[in-house]
Image: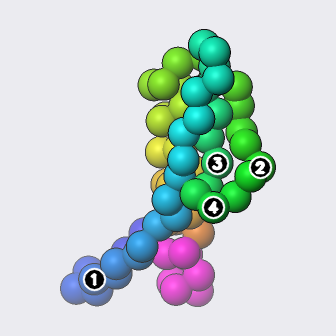
Amino acid sequence: MQETGITRVFALRAYTVKVKGNAYFIAPTGRTTWSGPYATLQHATTAIARKLAREFIERDQRLNG
């Protein structure tokens, strides 16, 4: 993924979590398109983690060519 000796720092997207009844929804902060419902907060935050990992990998691959 990364060459030795190269440091990369990425500011990744922020997410907002909404709770409606017993369901959790997530959206990039500032957007109104919600993903979900997720049954638990753990499922919602795991979905955010997957999205952030995908964002990091895509940015890193763009720089690696």
Residue position marked by numbered label 2 in the rendering: 33
Q: Please, what is the three-letter code of the amino acid marked with disc 2?
A: Thr
Amino acid type assigned to the residue bearing label 4 in the image: Gly
Residue visible at 61% across and 55% down in the picture: 28
Residue indicated by mark 3: 27
Q: Which residues are magenta?
A: 59-65
Of residue 65 and residue 32, the one placed in the foreground of this image is: 32
Question: Is residue 10 visible from the viewing direction of this image?
Answer: yes
Q: Earlier in the sequence, mark 1 or mark 2?
A: 1
Q: Are marks 3 and 4 in contact (CB under 8 Å)?
A: no
Note whether residue 47 is visible: no
Q: How many marks?
A: 4
In three-dimensional space, the C-alpha distance between marks 1 and 4, rounded to whole angstroms, equals: 29 Å
Task: Reply above or below: 39 against 3.
Answer: above
Helix, strand or loop at mark 2 = loop
At a point 64% along the width and 48% down the height, the residue shown is 27
Dot placed on the residue nearer the N-terminal end, 2 or 3: 3
Cα separation between marks 1 and 3: 29 Å
Q: Which residue is mark 1?
A: 7
Marks 1 and 4: which is nearer the front?
Answer: 4
Foreground: disc 1 or disc 3? 3
